[in-house]
């Protein structure tokens, strides 16, 4: 069983991080409020998970102003895309092989 789970990436174990990456894999960018609404999480919870993904280099952050309002958007980095695809492949393998 250890071999089956050895390719899973610990950074994606959280359902919220899995959700963030899933959204970012199919969208070029996504802003904070849209992520919060899509994933139905609180500001603080989302911010913590985004910070963890950013720290690992899985996502990039862009801060800007739209009019007078701050807007923070996120995108999956190339490293994040590769790691997430490998994680999903490992999950599929786990399901298929058990």
Image (cartoon, grey):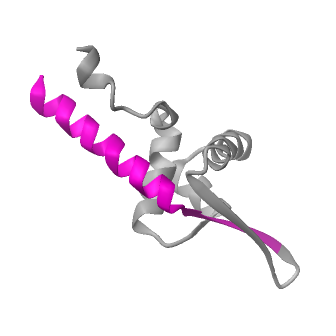
Seen from this angle, which residue lies furthest right?
Answer: 68
Percent coordinates x, y for residue 26 in the rendering: 40, 66
Q: Residue at x 40, y 48 (%)?
A: 84
In magenta stretch: residue 6:
no
Residue 6 as seen in the image, left or right of residue 59:
left
Name the residue nearer the viewer: 77 or 69. Answer: 77
Percent coordinates x, y for residue 54 in the rendering: 65, 50
In magenta stretch: residue 93:
yes
Q: Residue at x 51, y 51 (%)?
A: 20
Q: What's the magenta region?
A: 70-98
Q: Quadrant of the N terminus?
A: top left
Q: Quadrant of the C terminus?
A: top left
Residue 95 as seen in the image, left or right of residue 81:
left
Q: Residue at x 79, y 75 (%)?
A: 64
Q: Majority secondary structure of the magenta segment?
A: helix
Q: Quadrant of residue 18?
A: top left
Q: Quadrant of residue 73?
A: bottom right
């Amino acid at each position: 069983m250890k071999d089956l789970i050895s390719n899973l990436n610990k950074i994606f174990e959280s359902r919220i991080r899995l959700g963030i990456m899933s959204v970012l894999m199919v969208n070029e960018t996504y802003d904070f409020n849209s992520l919060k609404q899509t994933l139905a999480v609180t500001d603080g919870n989302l911010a913590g998970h985004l910070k963890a993904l950013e720290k690992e280099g899985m996502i990039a952050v862009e801060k800007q102003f739209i009019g007078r309002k701050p807007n923070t958007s996120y995108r999956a980095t190339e490293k994040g895309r590769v790691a997430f695809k490998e994680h999903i492949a490992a999950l599929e393998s786990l399901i298929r092989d058990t």
